[in-house]
Image: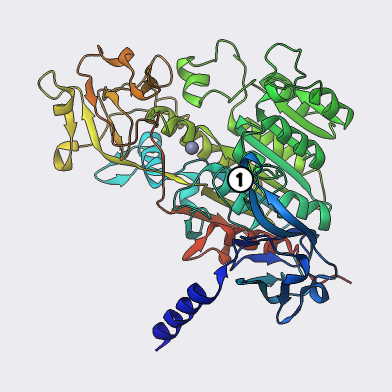
Amino acid sequence: MRTLLSALAATTLLAGAAQATAIYPLDRATILVSSPFDFKIELDAVHPEEEIAVTVNGKPYAETFGTKADYVAEEKGKDDAVLGSALILRDLALAEPGSYTVEVRAGDETRTVTWEVYATPAAPKARNIIFFVGDGLSVAHRTAARIMSKGMTEGKADGRLAMDDLDHMAFIGTSSTHSVATDSANTMSAYMTGHKSRVNALGVYADRTPATQDDPKVETIAEALRRTTGKSIGVVSTAEIEDATPAAVVAHTRKRGEKADIVGMFHDIRPEVMLGGGSAYFLKSDIPGSKRKDDSDYVAMFREAGYTLATNAAELDAARGSDAERLLGLFHTGNMDTKLDRSFLHQGTVGKFPNQPGLVEMTEAALDQLSKNEEGFFLMVEGASIDKMSHPMDWDRAVIDTIEFDQAIASARAFAETHPDTLIVVTGDHTHGVSVIGTIDDDKPGDEMREKVGTYDAAGFPNYTDADGDGYPDRIDVSRRLAIFSSNFPDHYETWRPKMDGPFEPSVQNEKGEYVANEAYKDIPGAVLRVGNLPKSADTAVHAVDDVVLQATGPGAEEFKGYMEQSDVYRVLVDAFALGAPRN
Ligand SMILES: [Zn+2]
C-alpha cells in the first residue's frame, strides 16, 4: 500500500510539479542548535519573488528564521547562462531543537526537506578531544602495520598496536552528497562540520554557481569552539597544513585546491597550534619556493598574532620548552616526507629538508602546548602519507607511516592516562582498495617474481625483525615480506619489491595525456607489466567506497557504535564537549 501511494505521489510530482533544484542544507541534515549556517534555495526557472512561497513547519519561513532571505532573480552559471532564481539567507541559526520541514513552491516547482536540529547534554563529558585521522586508513594498513611492527607466531600477533585497544568501535560510511566515491575534503569536512558535502568541498554545501567561495556555509568545529568555549585548537599533519584534511578543521570553500586562501582561513581562526608542511602558501610571492600569487606574508602575520615559528625538529623542540603563546611549525614547503624516508632510507626530499620532526614529536609538542589551557582543547592529528603513499601503491611507505601514526596514538594514550577527561578518536577519512594476501618469498625457486607470491599455506610468515625494539622493522627488504595488493590501478610495472630508491611512481603521462606504465621500473628483474583497470586518466590507485573503521576511548566514546554516517561523528564530538548546551 505504502509503495503504491508513494508511486502515485511520485507520478503526481512528475506530472504536475517539477522538483526545484535544491534546498541547502539538504534533506535529513542534522544541525547543532544555534550553529550558524547558510540557507539557500535554487529554483530551476526564473520566478518573480512574490511567486516563491517558503514555509517552515507549515508557517511562512520568516516567522521561524526571524528574517527574510535575499532574492536573486537570475543566478548565472557558466558563460552567463541563466540557471533560475534563488533565495539566500546567510548565517541563519536555529535556537530551538526539533524537526524543521522546509517546503518551497514556486510556479510548478516544489521541494521539501526536513532537518533535525539537536541540542547536546548540558554538561560536558570530556575536557579534551584528540581526533586522529589516518588519511586513507584501511583495515589492510592496520593488519600490515601490526605484523610488520610486532610480528606474528603460529597465527597470533606477537604484540598489539596502540589503536588495537581502544574500546569503542563503529563502521563509518564515507560517501559524498553526489557520489558513492569520495575524497579527503568532503569526508573530513563531514567529520568537522556534521554535514556531508560534495567531492573537493570544505565547510560548504556545493551549490550550482561557478564561484567557489559563495557556496552555502556550515559551521566548522573550530568555529563552534570559538563561538561557545575558551578551548584551544590544534592542527597537526604530515601533509601541507592547508591540504584538505587539516583544512577541514577551519575552511569554507567549494575547491580544496584554493590553498593560498585556506591559509587566510587558518589565520581567521588562529588555532593555538599548527604543525605540518606547506610553507609555500605562507610565503609572499617574491620569496623563493612561494606558491602565493599575492604579497601577503603569512609568516609575518602569524608572528604578529603571537605565534612562535619552528621550521625544523630542533626549533620545534626549543619552542616546546618555551612559554610560547601559540605555535606555528612549517617543516616543508610541500608535504613532509614519509617516516621510511625521514628515518631510514633518506630518499624523497629528505636531502633538502633533513631535519623534519616526526608525527610523534609533533603530537607531543601539540599536547604540551594545548594542555596549558585549563579549559581544554581540540586537537586534530593527521597521518597523511598513509594515503599519499597508497595512491602510488608504495605499500612499505604507507605501512611504515601507519606504524608512526600508531605511535602518535600511543603518545596520546599516555597523555590520557594523566588526563582521563580526554576523548581519543582514531579513524580514517576514507579507505583504499588494498589487501594483504600473503607473502613474497625471494627464496622460492625460479626467476619469475610472480611465482614467489605465497598464498594460503604457502604464505607462511614474513621474516621482518625489530632488533632495536623501536617498533619499526629493521629492514623492509627482507627475503620474505608481506604481499600487499591494490584492487585498482593504472598501467604499471609490478616489481613485487620494496621501493628503496624513493616513492613509487607507477605511471607517467604520454603525449596523448593518458597515463601509461613508468618504464623506469621495466628492467627491475622479474618486473611485469600490469594493465590497468582504471580509466587512462588515472595516474594512481584511487580511494575505495568501503567503510572506514573508527575506534575511540575516553568519555563520550560509548556513543560510537554500529554503522554511522561520517556526519554523525560530529554529533558525538559536540555532545562530548556540550557545545549545544541550553544557554541562559
Ligand atoms: Zn587520497
Q: Is residue 424 visible?
A: no
Q: Measuring 52% from the left and 37% from the top, which residue is drawn there?
A: 405
Q: In the current view of this chain or complex, which residue is farthest to the left?
A: 446
Q: Is residue 474 above or below residue 48?
A: above
Numbered-mark total: 1
**Quarter occupied by the C terminus:** bottom right
Q: Is residue 163 above or below residue 292?
A: below
x, y percent for residue 99: 67, 77
x, y percent for residue 409: 56, 43
Residue picked out by circle 1: 201
x, y percent for residue 568: 58, 62
x, y percent for residue 529: 23, 23
Q: Amino acid at mark 1?
A: Ala
Q: Is residue 378 above or below residue 172?
A: above
**Does the beta carbon of the residue at mark 1 sit less than 8 Å from ligand 1?**
no
Nearer to the camera, 406 or 244:
244
Instruction: Tell me the element at label 1.
Output: loop
Q: Residues within 10 Å of mark 1 (few under 14, many from 20)?
A: many
356 sits left or right of 147 in the view: right
402 sits left or right of 354 in the view: left
**Quarter occupied by the N terminus:** bottom left
